[in-house]
Structure formats: structure tokens, C-alpha cells
Image: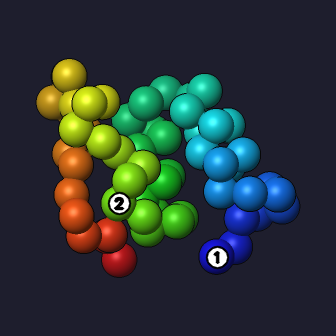
Amino acid sequence: VDLFGFSSVAELLRLLREQEEIEYCRICYTMLAIAYCCSSEDDEDGAKVATDDPIG
């Protein structure tokens, strides 16, 4: 996985979480294609969808 210069996935995700949540979700799926980026706990506004399948 290309982490774009970050030392770990956790570091990248922590940075992304500081951004707007929907954008974080979109970037996470698009760039990393890992399903746990968006969890059901984060789906309060209905804008994010949890899935077992990575997109891509």
C-alpha cells in the first residue's frame, strides 16, 4: 500500500480524521480501499456507509 510518505496506516488515518468526515471517508476508500475507514458508529448523519467490501 502506498502511504504517500506516511510512516503507517494509523498515521495517515489520524491525519484524515482531522479533515471533514465525508472527505475522509471518500479519500480513505479511494486511496486505500480498506473497509474499516468508515464505521457504522460514524454514520450518524447518513452520509457514510459501512461495508464489508472495499471499493475498487
Q: Which residue is mark 1?
A: 1
Question: What residue sits 43% from the left and 30% below the top?
Answer: 21
Lateral position of residue 3 relative to residue 21, left or right: right
Lateral position of residue 34 relative to residue 9, left or right: left
Local crowd at mark 1 within 10 Å, few (<14), some, or many (≥20)? few
The amino acid type found where label 1 is placed reads Val
Q: Are marks 1 and 2 in contact (CB under 8 Å)?
A: no
The amino acid type found where label 2 is placed reads Ala
Quadrant location of the N terminus in the rendered image: bottom right
Question: What residue sits 45% from the left and 39% below the top?
Answer: 23
Vertical order, 42 against 9 (above or below):
above
| x and y percentages locating residue 42 in the rendered image | 30, 30
Local crowd at mark 2 within 10 Å, few (<14), some, or many (≥20)? some
Q: Is residue 26 visible?
A: no
Vertical order, 28 against 44 (above or below):
below
Lateral position of residue 29 relative to residue 10, left or right: left
Q: Which residue is mark 2?
A: 35
Question: What residue sits 20% from the left and 45% below the top?
Answer: 49
Vertical order, 11 against 45 (above or below):
below
| x and y percentages locating residue 11 in the rendered image | 72, 46
Query: Of helix, strand and loop, which one carries label 1?
Result: loop
Query: Of helix, strand and loop, which one carries label 2?
Result: helix
| x and y percentages locating residue 37 in the rendered image | 42, 49
Q: Quadrant of residue 51?
A: bottom left
In whole angstroms, how far apart are the C-alphas of marks 1 and 2? 14 Å
Q: Quadrant of residue 29?
A: bottom left
Quadrant location of the C terminus in the rendered image: bottom left
